[in-house]
Image (tube, rainbow, N blue to C red):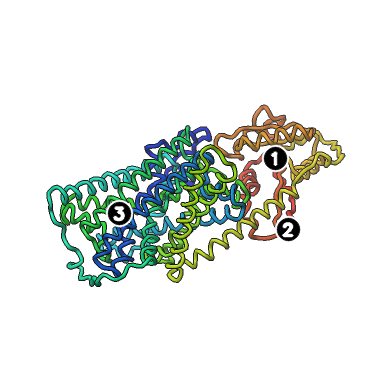
């Protein structure tokens, strides 16, 4: 029953060979990996005005445009930098890989932790903002705001668990609709004002805003406005993080998407900022600045106004999909390096990194419940993490050019050097201005995550050291007289835990065979080389599992004519099981032996024996 329900919701299980078909081309890669960055233009201009208007009043619009130009300049720097990152690091990982390779382990972990925090917040903030747009249109739904947000997160989780291709179809089209309607808004808004000379409505008189007399503009005020507007840049790093999600040639496709992303944000952000100086929207809790601009351009009761509002609401919600596309991949890279639980390297039934997707669902849902789906309470925690990763990425690329001095390194280093300084200053300003409002939480969480990652790595290193089997450590000289019992040793790698299983199996029977299920080609090749080098003395049977399942290939082998046992004869399966001394270490292991045993217990002709191997701390 559960299997049928899972198949109905998620679809049929895909073969590993189907992974290529699940990857993204340029057309679908742009909306999936760029929805966060593209959606930011919906509120970035408003964030700038919210800082400027209470201080300098009607003069805000001039300075807002200048600040927007500065943000656009930083956008160009980031696009150039991440293009170099894509060329240099084709396996993805973005800021984490760049900082890890060029600045050291700790900076790399700080970048990884910062991005992880930012991606989780992206889901909570985007869904909460989209939910607020829905409840603003339908106030009767306001008491159910948290439930609506949780339901939306669940739908996005299911969509991404169905695989990249499915999520691209589900979330890609609304992104293109928002881009198209925004382009129409900008062009028609400028034509209406410049060509037809239609004067826009003054909104602050309607909303009874008190506009102060213009006062002195300080550097600190401009920096605060710049830092608030830099929310338009969140998500720019997503393309370089997600290179493996693209079809071959993955690097070229990623570069094209990054260039398209930069062009789209450049046009939309600059265009909407310019419209704001014409239509002079005022930040308020009733109607967003973007809605005021759209109302001024289309008219508040026109069909185009409602279409644009709907497109804006949808893009704000599906901006969370960038996190679903990138964070599981980032976690898989960190897990492969040993800094995150290895379960994050496992692909699910639909070839997505399902454990990472489920983690996003749980943590973002918790944030929505704690903050009651109010994005204004979540925003102070937002953006700081991404600018920390920006700075580390820029600094890492700067060091790479200076160290290796490849062709054209001087202008590349200069560009990255400027980017390092600008993103560092922006991060300091964001941290300083939003520290008391909640940014202090991020300043605690990131170091805590880094310490956890270091401890995880230390744990895996200790296990590797304890399990390491040298060529001199040979099996015990044991000769069993029983040749009727059939023993199968389940083996993943040649280690001391396997040696213990082998020594025990020799007490049981002479008929011993080692069985390996291949779900990772690299791991299987390593096992074959070690097996040949060690000369174990028993046959090694390797079966490829296209669906990444261990149980079915094992049972099929035992019941096949290839195995020496006859139909109905009892077969003993011996497997190693780690015994962990600290409870929290169980989180770092996937408990494969437990699940296989549970399935094998249902087979009448199979006896399962677990050989414990104690991991000492």
The quadrant of the image that shows the C terminus is bottom right
Q: Is residue 248 left or right of residue 179?
A: right
Q: Which mark is residue 313?
A: 3
Q: In 3D space, how far apart are the residues under numbered discs 1 and 3 (Cα atoms)?
A: 52 Å
In percent of width and height, residue 405 lies at 57, 41
Residue visible at 49% across and 48% down in the picture: 416
Q: Nearer the viewer, residue 244 or 251?
A: 251
Residue visible at 87% across and 39% down in the picture: 477
Rendering quarter of residue 584: bottom right
Check the image and report above or below for 160 versus 251. below
In percent of width and height, residue 282 lies at 25, 64
Q: Is residue 115 visible?
A: no
The numbered mark, 2 or 3, whose residue comes first in the sequence reads 3
Q: Which residue is mark 1?
A: 491
Q: Is residue 193 left or right of residue 612?
A: left
| Secondary structure under the numbered disc 1 in the rendered image | loop
Q: In 3D space, how far apart are the residues under numbered discs 1 and 2 (Cα atoms)?
A: 24 Å
Check the image and report above or below for 480 versus 331. above
| Secondary structure under the numbered disc 2 in the rendered image | loop
Q: Is residue 410 visible?
A: yes
Q: In 3D space, how far apart are the residues under numbered discs 2 and 3 (Cα atoms)?
A: 51 Å
Circles 1 and 2, Cβ within 8 Å, touching? The answer is no
In percent of width and height, residue 420 lies at 49, 53
The numbered mark, 1 or 3, whose residue comes first in the sequence reads 3
Q: Which residue is mark 2?
A: 617
| Secondary structure under the numbered disc 3 in the rendered image | helix
Q: Nearer the viewer, residue 307 or 145?
A: 307
The numbered mark, 1 or 2, whose residue comes first in the sequence reads 1
């Amino acid at each position: 029953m559960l299997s049928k329900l899972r198949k109905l919701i998620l679809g049929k299980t895909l073969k590993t060979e189907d992974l290529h078909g699940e990857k993204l081309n340029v057309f679908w890669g742009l909306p999936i990996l760029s929805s966060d960055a593209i959606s930011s233009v919906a509120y970035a201009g408003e964030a700038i005005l919210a800082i400027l208007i209470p201080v300098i009043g009607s003069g805000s619009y001039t300075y807002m445009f200048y600040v927007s130009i500065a943000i656009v300049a930083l956008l160009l720097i980031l696009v150039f930098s991440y293009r170099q990152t894509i060329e240099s690091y084709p396996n993805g990982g973005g800021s984490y890989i760049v900082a890890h390779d060029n600045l050291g382990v700790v900076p790399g972990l700080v970048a990884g932790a910062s991005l992880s925090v930012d991606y989780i917040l992206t889901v909570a903030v985007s869904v909460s903002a989209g939910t607020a747009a829905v409840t603003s249109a339908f106030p009767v739904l306001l008491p159910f705001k948290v439930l609506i947000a949780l339901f939306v997160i669940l739908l996005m989780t299911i969509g991404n668990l169905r695989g990249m291709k499915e999520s691209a179809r589900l979330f890609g089209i609304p992104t293109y609709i928002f881009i198209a309607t925004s382009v129409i808004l900008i062009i028609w808004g400028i034509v209406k004002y410049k060509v037809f000379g239609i004067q826009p409505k003054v909104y602050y008189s309607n909303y009874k805003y008190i506009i102060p007399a213009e006062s002195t503009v300080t550097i600190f005020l401009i920096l605060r406005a710049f830092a608030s507007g830099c929310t338009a840049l969140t998500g720019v790093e997503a393309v370089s993080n997600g290179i493996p999600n693209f079809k071959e040639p993955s690097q070229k496709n990623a570069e094209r998407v990054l260039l398209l992303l930069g062009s789209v944000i450049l046009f939309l952000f600059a265009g909407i900022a310019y419209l704001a100086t014409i239509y002079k929207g005022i930040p308020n809790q009733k109607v967003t600045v973007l809605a005021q601009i759209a109302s001024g351009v289309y008219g508040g009761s026109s069909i185009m106004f409602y279409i644009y509002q709907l497109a804006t609401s949808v893009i704000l919600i599906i901006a969370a999909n960038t996190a679903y596309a990138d964070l599981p991949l980032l976690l898989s890279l960190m897990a492969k390096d040993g800094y995150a639980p290895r379960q994050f390297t496992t692909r699910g039934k639909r070839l997505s990194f399902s454990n990472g997707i489920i983690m996003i669902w749980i943590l973002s849902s918790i944030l929505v419940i704690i903050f009651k789906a109010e994005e204004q309470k979540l925003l102070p925690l937002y953006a700081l993490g991404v600018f920390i990763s920006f700075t580390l990425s820029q600094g890492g690329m700067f060091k790479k050019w200076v160290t290796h001095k490849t062709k054209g390194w001087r202008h590349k280093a200069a560009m990255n050097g400027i980017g390092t300084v600008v993103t560092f200053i922006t991060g300091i300003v964001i941290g300083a201005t939003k520290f008391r409002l909640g940014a202090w939480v991020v300043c605690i969480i990131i170091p805590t995550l880094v310490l956890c990652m270091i401890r995880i790595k230390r744990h895996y290193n200790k296990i590797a050291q304890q399990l390491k089997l040298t060529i001199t450590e040979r099996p015990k000289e044991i000769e069993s007289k029983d040749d009727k019992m059939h023993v199968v040793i389940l083996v993943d790698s040649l280690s001391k835990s396997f040696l213990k299983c082998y020594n025990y199996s020799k007490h049981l029977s002479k008929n011993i065979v080692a069985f390996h299920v291949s779900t990772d080609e690299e791991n299987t090749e390593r096992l074959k080389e070690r097996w040949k080098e060690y000369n174990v003395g028993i046959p090694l049977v390797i079966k490829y599992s296209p669906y990444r399942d261990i149980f079915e290939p094992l049972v099929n082998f035992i019941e096949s004519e290839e195995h020496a046992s006859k139909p109905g004869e009892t077969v003993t399966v011996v497997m190693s099981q780690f015994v962990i001394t600290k409870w929290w270490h169980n989180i770092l292991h996937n408990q494969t032996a437990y699940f296989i045993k549970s399935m094998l217990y249902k087979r009448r002709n199979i006896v399962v024996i677990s050989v414990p191997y104690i991991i000492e701390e």
